[in-house]
Amino acid sequence: MPVLYFPEVAEYAPFIAALGDQGGVELRRAGGYVAASSAQEISIARAATGLGEAVWFGALVGGFAGRILQFDDQLLRVGD
Amino acid sequence: MDAVTPRSDLRLRGVHHTAFPTWKPKSTVEFYRDGLGLRVPHAITARGWGRAGAEKHPDFLHFFFEAGEGMIAFFYYVGTERREEFTALRGYLGLARHTAWLAHDIDELEAWRGRIRAAGAKVTPVVQHETMASIYFVDPNGYNLEIACQTRALTEIDALDARLTLDALVETFGDDNPQGNGIEEMWRRKGEKVRAHMAGG
Protein backbone atom coordinates (compact mmCIF):
# COMPACT_ATOMS: atom_id res chain seq x y z
CA MET A 1 0.00 0.00 0.00
CA PRO A 2 1.70 3.26 -1.09
CA VAL A 3 1.81 6.09 1.45
CA LEU A 4 2.88 9.71 1.06
CA TYR A 5 3.74 11.80 4.12
CA PHE A 6 3.58 15.59 4.30
CA PRO A 7 4.44 17.98 7.12
CA GLU A 8 1.23 19.90 7.81
CA VAL A 9 2.45 23.35 6.78
CA ALA A 10 0.99 25.84 4.33
CA GLU A 11 3.15 25.18 1.27
CA TYR A 12 2.31 21.46 1.10
CA ALA A 13 -1.43 22.02 1.56
CA PRO A 14 -2.01 21.96 -2.25
CA PHE A 15 -0.70 18.37 -2.37
CA ILE A 16 -3.00 17.33 0.46
CA ALA A 17 -5.98 19.11 -1.11
CA ALA A 18 -5.36 17.38 -4.45
CA LEU A 19 -5.13 14.00 -2.72
CA GLY A 20 -8.25 14.65 -0.65
CA ASP A 21 -10.23 15.15 -3.86
CA GLN A 22 -9.40 11.63 -5.04
CA GLY A 23 -11.49 8.60 -4.25
CA GLY A 24 -9.65 5.79 -2.55
CA VAL A 25 -7.05 8.01 -0.85
CA GLU A 26 -7.29 8.02 2.93
CA LEU A 27 -5.84 11.01 4.80
CA ARG A 28 -4.72 10.58 8.40
CA ARG A 29 -3.35 13.37 10.59
CA ALA A 30 -1.05 13.01 13.62
CA GLY A 31 1.93 14.76 15.16
CA GLY A 32 2.10 17.57 12.62
CA TYR A 33 2.01 15.27 9.60
CA VAL A 34 -0.57 14.04 7.12
CA ALA A 35 -0.32 10.50 5.76
CA ALA A 36 -2.07 9.81 2.43
CA SER A 37 -2.52 6.11 1.74
CA SER A 38 -4.35 4.08 -0.84
CA ALA A 39 -4.90 0.46 -1.79
CA GLN A 40 -4.03 1.48 -5.34
CA GLU A 41 -1.38 3.61 -6.97
CA ILE A 42 -1.37 7.25 -5.79
CA SER A 43 -0.95 9.96 -8.39
CA ILE A 44 -0.87 13.76 -8.18
CA ALA A 45 -0.95 15.99 -11.25
CA ARG A 46 1.02 19.19 -10.87
CA ALA A 47 -1.84 21.01 -12.63
CA ALA A 48 -4.15 20.06 -9.75
CA THR A 49 -1.81 21.68 -7.23
CA GLY A 50 -1.11 24.93 -9.07
CA LEU A 51 2.47 24.79 -7.75
CA GLY A 52 5.61 26.22 -9.29
CA GLU A 53 8.56 23.93 -9.90
CA ALA A 54 10.50 24.76 -6.71
CA VAL A 55 7.79 23.43 -4.39
CA TRP A 56 6.41 20.77 -6.79
CA PHE A 57 9.73 18.98 -6.94
CA GLY A 58 9.77 18.90 -3.15
CA ALA A 59 6.63 16.75 -3.12
CA LEU A 60 8.34 13.85 -1.34
CA VAL A 61 9.81 15.99 1.45
CA GLY A 62 7.93 14.03 4.10
CA GLY A 63 9.01 10.69 2.72
CA PHE A 64 6.94 7.85 1.39
CA ALA A 65 6.38 4.10 1.40
CA GLY A 66 6.33 2.18 -1.87
CA ARG A 67 8.05 2.81 -5.16
CA ILE A 68 8.26 5.89 -7.38
CA LEU A 69 6.66 5.07 -10.74
CA GLN A 70 6.92 8.58 -12.18
CA PHE A 71 8.09 11.94 -10.86
CA ASP A 72 8.54 14.66 -13.45
CA ASP A 73 7.34 18.22 -13.96
CA GLN A 74 3.76 17.09 -14.63
CA LEU A 75 3.00 14.00 -12.57
CA LEU A 76 3.94 12.11 -9.44
CA ARG A 77 2.91 8.43 -9.26
CA VAL A 78 3.76 6.13 -6.36
CA GLY A 79 2.84 2.46 -6.26
CA ASP A 80 3.77 -0.71 -4.39
CA MET B 1 39.52 23.79 36.97
CA ASP B 2 38.91 24.12 33.30
CA ALA B 3 40.11 27.49 32.04
CA VAL B 4 37.11 27.70 29.73
CA THR B 5 33.88 28.20 31.61
CA PRO B 6 30.97 26.52 29.83
CA ARG B 7 28.43 29.09 28.70
CA SER B 8 24.90 27.92 28.16
CA ASP B 9 24.10 31.13 26.29
CA LEU B 10 26.89 30.66 23.73
CA ARG B 11 25.62 31.12 20.20
CA LEU B 12 26.69 32.80 17.00
CA ARG B 13 25.30 36.29 16.57
CA GLY B 14 25.12 36.50 12.80
CA VAL B 15 27.60 37.01 9.97
CA HIS B 16 30.36 39.57 10.60
CA HIS B 17 31.64 39.32 7.03
CA THR B 18 32.36 36.94 4.22
CA ALA B 19 35.40 37.58 2.02
CA PHE B 20 36.36 36.91 -1.59
CA PRO B 21 39.35 37.66 -3.82
CA THR B 22 38.85 40.17 -6.61
CA TRP B 23 40.91 41.08 -9.64
CA LYS B 24 38.38 43.75 -10.68
CA PRO B 25 38.54 46.38 -7.92
CA LYS B 26 37.10 49.14 -10.13
CA SER B 27 34.07 47.14 -11.24
CA THR B 28 33.61 45.78 -7.71
CA VAL B 29 33.52 49.24 -6.14
CA GLU B 30 31.24 50.56 -8.87
CA PHE B 31 28.84 47.64 -8.46
CA TYR B 32 28.59 47.39 -4.69
CA ARG B 33 29.10 51.02 -3.64
CA ASP B 34 27.67 52.96 -6.55
CA GLY B 35 25.24 50.44 -8.01
CA LEU B 36 23.79 48.64 -4.99
CA GLY B 37 24.40 51.67 -2.77
CA LEU B 38 26.22 49.82 0.00
CA ARG B 39 28.14 51.92 2.51
CA VAL B 40 31.90 51.37 2.81
CA PRO B 41 32.65 51.33 6.54
CA HIS B 42 36.22 50.03 6.40
CA ALA B 43 39.20 49.47 4.10
CA ILE B 44 42.69 48.15 4.82
CA THR B 45 45.85 48.53 2.73
CA ALA B 46 48.91 46.52 3.62
CA ARG B 47 52.37 45.54 2.59
CA GLY B 48 52.51 41.83 1.96
CA TRP B 49 54.35 39.68 4.44
CA GLY B 50 55.42 36.09 4.80
CA ARG B 51 58.33 34.06 3.57
CA ALA B 52 60.26 34.80 0.43
CA GLY B 53 59.72 33.04 -2.85
CA ALA B 54 56.50 31.31 -3.84
CA GLU B 55 54.96 31.74 -0.38
CA LYS B 56 55.60 35.47 -0.27
CA HIS B 57 52.35 37.24 0.40
CA PRO B 58 51.55 40.00 -2.10
CA ASP B 59 50.70 43.54 -1.06
CA PHE B 60 46.96 43.80 -0.72
CA LEU B 61 43.84 45.82 -0.06
CA HIS B 62 40.95 44.48 2.01
CA PHE B 63 37.75 46.48 1.72
CA PHE B 64 34.28 46.05 3.13
CA PHE B 65 30.74 46.84 2.06
CA GLU B 66 27.93 47.04 4.59
CA ALA B 67 25.14 44.53 3.95
CA GLY B 68 22.67 44.90 6.80
CA GLU B 69 24.04 43.42 10.05
CA GLY B 70 27.09 41.96 8.32
CA MET B 71 29.52 42.89 5.58
CA ILE B 72 30.82 41.48 2.32
CA ALA B 73 34.55 42.01 1.87
CA PHE B 74 37.10 41.69 -0.90
CA PHE B 75 40.83 41.16 -1.09
CA TYR B 76 42.74 42.69 -3.97
CA TYR B 77 46.24 41.22 -4.21
CA VAL B 78 48.41 43.69 -6.09
CA GLY B 79 50.35 42.31 -9.02
CA THR B 80 48.72 38.88 -9.08
CA GLU B 81 47.04 37.28 -12.06
CA ARG B 82 43.40 36.31 -11.95
CA ARG B 83 42.79 32.67 -10.94
CA GLU B 84 39.64 31.50 -12.67
CA GLU B 85 39.20 28.54 -10.33
CA PHE B 86 38.33 31.00 -7.57
CA THR B 87 35.92 33.14 -9.55
CA ALA B 88 34.34 31.01 -12.32
CA LEU B 89 31.55 29.53 -10.21
CA ARG B 90 29.21 28.21 -12.89
CA GLY B 91 26.73 25.36 -13.11
CA TYR B 92 24.84 23.93 -10.14
CA LEU B 93 28.04 23.29 -8.17
CA GLY B 94 29.17 26.88 -8.68
CA LEU B 95 25.73 28.21 -7.80
CA ALA B 96 25.75 26.20 -4.58
CA ARG B 97 28.41 28.61 -3.32
CA HIS B 98 26.62 31.89 -2.91
CA THR B 99 25.87 34.73 -0.56
CA ALA B 100 22.20 35.32 0.34
CA TRP B 101 21.18 38.58 1.98
CA LEU B 102 17.96 39.21 3.82
CA ALA B 103 15.13 41.51 2.72
CA HIS B 104 11.91 42.20 4.62
CA ASP B 105 9.36 41.17 2.01
CA ILE B 106 8.63 40.61 -1.67
CA ASP B 107 8.07 44.35 -2.26
CA GLU B 108 11.67 44.90 -1.19
CA LEU B 109 12.84 42.10 -3.48
CA GLU B 110 11.12 43.82 -6.40
CA ALA B 111 12.75 47.12 -5.46
CA TRP B 112 16.14 45.41 -5.34
CA ARG B 113 15.50 43.91 -8.78
CA GLY B 114 15.20 47.43 -10.16
CA ARG B 115 18.35 48.63 -8.44
CA ILE B 116 20.37 45.59 -9.55
CA ARG B 117 19.29 46.08 -13.16
CA ALA B 118 20.20 49.76 -12.94
CA ALA B 119 23.62 48.68 -11.63
CA GLY B 120 24.11 46.79 -14.89
CA ALA B 121 23.55 43.20 -13.76
CA LYS B 122 20.98 40.67 -14.86
CA VAL B 123 18.62 39.52 -12.16
CA THR B 124 16.04 36.74 -12.04
CA PRO B 125 12.34 37.22 -11.35
CA VAL B 126 11.24 36.50 -7.77
CA VAL B 127 11.36 32.72 -7.19
CA GLN B 128 8.96 31.34 -4.55
CA HIS B 129 10.50 28.51 -2.52
CA GLU B 130 8.91 26.53 0.29
CA THR B 131 9.15 29.16 3.03
CA MET B 132 11.05 31.96 1.33
CA ALA B 133 11.28 33.93 -1.89
CA SER B 134 14.50 34.87 -3.68
CA ILE B 135 16.10 36.80 -6.49
CA TYR B 136 19.46 35.79 -7.94
CA PHE B 137 22.20 37.77 -9.65
CA VAL B 138 25.94 37.72 -10.29
CA ASP B 139 28.51 40.37 -9.37
CA PRO B 140 31.22 41.65 -11.78
CA ASN B 141 33.67 39.07 -10.41
CA GLY B 142 31.35 36.17 -11.21
CA TYR B 143 30.20 35.61 -7.61
CA ASN B 144 26.68 34.36 -7.13
CA LEU B 145 24.42 36.54 -5.01
CA GLU B 146 20.88 36.17 -3.70
CA ILE B 147 18.49 38.37 -1.80
CA ALA B 148 15.78 36.47 0.04
CA CYS B 149 12.87 37.03 2.39
CA GLN B 150 10.94 34.60 4.59
CA THR B 151 7.37 34.34 3.36
CA ARG B 152 6.21 32.66 6.55
CA ALA B 153 7.74 32.10 9.97
CA LEU B 154 9.37 28.72 10.55
CA THR B 155 7.59 26.59 13.15
CA GLU B 156 8.26 23.61 15.42
CA ILE B 157 6.88 21.35 12.70
CA ASP B 158 9.56 22.63 10.31
CA ALA B 159 12.26 21.91 12.89
CA LEU B 160 10.89 18.43 13.61
CA ASP B 161 10.73 17.67 9.89
CA ALA B 162 14.27 18.97 9.38
CA ARG B 163 15.53 16.72 12.19
CA LEU B 164 13.96 13.64 10.61
CA THR B 165 15.33 14.63 7.19
CA LEU B 166 18.88 15.02 8.51
CA ASP B 167 18.64 11.65 10.28
CA ALA B 168 17.58 10.05 6.98
CA LEU B 169 20.26 12.00 5.07
CA VAL B 170 23.11 10.80 7.30
CA GLU B 171 21.87 7.20 7.41
CA THR B 172 21.36 7.00 3.66
CA PHE B 173 24.44 8.73 2.33
CA GLY B 174 26.99 8.85 5.15
CA ASP B 175 30.08 10.48 3.70
CA ASP B 176 30.67 10.02 -0.03
CA ASN B 177 27.64 7.70 -0.31
CA PRO B 178 29.56 4.38 -0.08
CA GLN B 179 26.43 2.33 -0.89
CA GLY B 180 25.58 4.37 -3.98
CA ASN B 181 22.09 5.13 -2.70
CA GLY B 182 19.66 7.35 -4.60
CA ILE B 183 17.29 9.93 -3.17
CA GLU B 184 14.38 7.45 -3.43
CA GLU B 185 16.07 5.37 -0.71
CA MET B 186 16.44 8.50 1.44
CA TRP B 187 12.76 9.42 0.95
CA ARG B 188 11.77 5.87 1.91
CA ARG B 189 13.78 6.06 5.15
CA LYS B 190 12.29 9.47 5.86
CA GLY B 191 8.82 8.02 5.36
CA GLU B 192 9.60 5.27 7.86
CA LYS B 193 10.73 7.84 10.43
CA VAL B 194 7.58 9.92 9.88
CA ARG B 195 5.42 6.78 10.18
CA ALA B 196 7.07 5.96 13.53
CA HIS B 197 6.65 9.56 14.70
CA MET B 198 2.95 9.56 13.78
CA ALA B 199 2.51 6.32 15.70
CA GLY B 200 3.95 8.05 18.77
CA GLY B 201 7.42 6.48 18.44
Image (cartoon, rainbow, N blue to C red):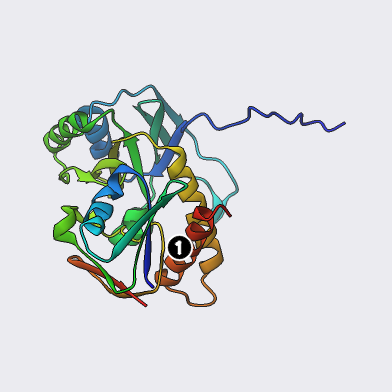
**How far from the left and from the top, in percent, is residue B182?**
42, 73
**How far from the left and from the top, in percent, is residue B152?**
32, 35
Please indicate, yes or no, whether residue B84 appears anywhere in the rendered image. no
**How far from the left and from the top, in percent, is residue B106?**
21, 33
Quadrant the N terminus of chain B occupies: top right
> Are there few (<14), some (14-19), or many (20+) residues within 10 Å of tag 1?
many
Q: Is residue A30 left or right of residue B123?
A: right
| Viewer-nearest residue: B89 or B77 | B89
Name the residue rendered at 49%, 35% in the picture.
B47
Q: Is residue B125 above or below residue A59?
A: above
Query: Chain for mark 1?
Result: B
Q: Is residue B123 left or right of residue B52?
A: left
**How far from the left and from the top, in percent, is residue B124?**
17, 46
Q: Which residue is mark 1?
A: B191
| Viewer-nearest residue: B57 or B171 | B171
Q: Amino acid at mark 1?
A: Gly
For mark 1, give the secondary structure: helix
Quadrant the C terminus of chain B occupies: bottom right
